[in-house]
Amino acid sequence: MTVTQDLSILALVTQASVLVQAVMALLLGVSLMSWTHIFRKWFQLRAAKRETEKFERDFWSGADLNALFQSAANDRHGSGSLERIFEAGMREYLKIKQSRGDGATQLEGARRAMRATFQREMDDLESHLAFLASVGSVSPYVGLFGTVWGIMNSFRGLANVQQATLANVAPGIAEALIATAIGLFAAIPAVIAYNRYAHDIDRLSIRFESFIEEFSNILQRQAR
């Protein structure tokens, strides 16, 4: 077998020790899960931004609040996060109004309902971000553990060699370094995705909170 064949990626992985192979398999599995969450979160946030922009256009175009409320109530599962926040506030406002509550009670109830829905929507948008953060921070160290273990085994193998040469340790070190490479392969996309998605979610959060304040002002004027 030639040196090139010995140092091919496939040969190095198959010839690695059991522990290093286990580390590689773990990192590949984590990387696959990470990419799954990356793509799912990308589609989720893209849909959330599109639905938010659509509802903001409808709301600020002067549409009737009752008509918007009926539309949101009839399609709660198909509506966006901002529309559900509006629907929760409007529903609570109308419920208290029908029970003859005063203006301050109506406004406070609507704000509480919107804040509760806001928290639920943010929790849904932030789901799996912690996993991406963990992958980005831990994967390089897991890969480094596999590398250190592989290098230790490589040098331990020199104990039975009369004359140590680079050819004796090169395959062992190369197969060990693959674990670090896989760890970085898992970590880098996760870190980039986490930073990007955290920024997008923060911007959506600001838009939701601004809407809650602006809609509360509208309800306050109506309550008077």
Image (tube, rainbow, N blue to C red):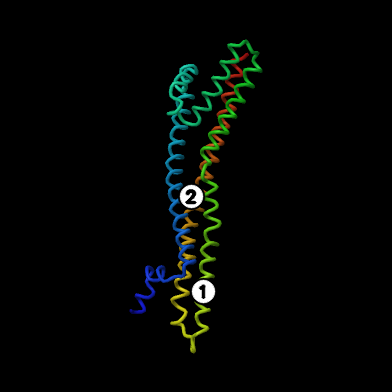
Above or below 138: residue 109: above
Q: Residues within 10 Å of mark 1 (few under 14, many from 20)?
A: many
Q: Nearer the viewer, residue 159 or 12?
A: 159
Q: Position of residue 69 (x, y in %)?
A: 48, 20
Picture quarter with the N terminus: bottom left
Count of marks, rendered view: 2
Residue holding disc 1: 151
Are the two marked residues, 1 and 2, in contact with CB atoms closer than 8 angstroms?
no
**Gap in angstroms between the C-alphas marked 1 and 2:** 32 Å
Report the amino acid beneath label 1.
Answer: Ile
Above or below 182: residue 196: above
Seen at 49% across and 52% down, the residue is 192
Q: Which mark is residue 177?
A: none
* Residue furthest left in the image: 1
Q: Position of residue 73 (x, y in %)?
A: 47, 21
Seen at 46% across and 26% down, the residue is 76
Q: Residues within 10 Å of mark 2 (few under 14, many from 20)?
A: many
Picture quarter with the C terminus: top right
Residue holding disc 2: 193
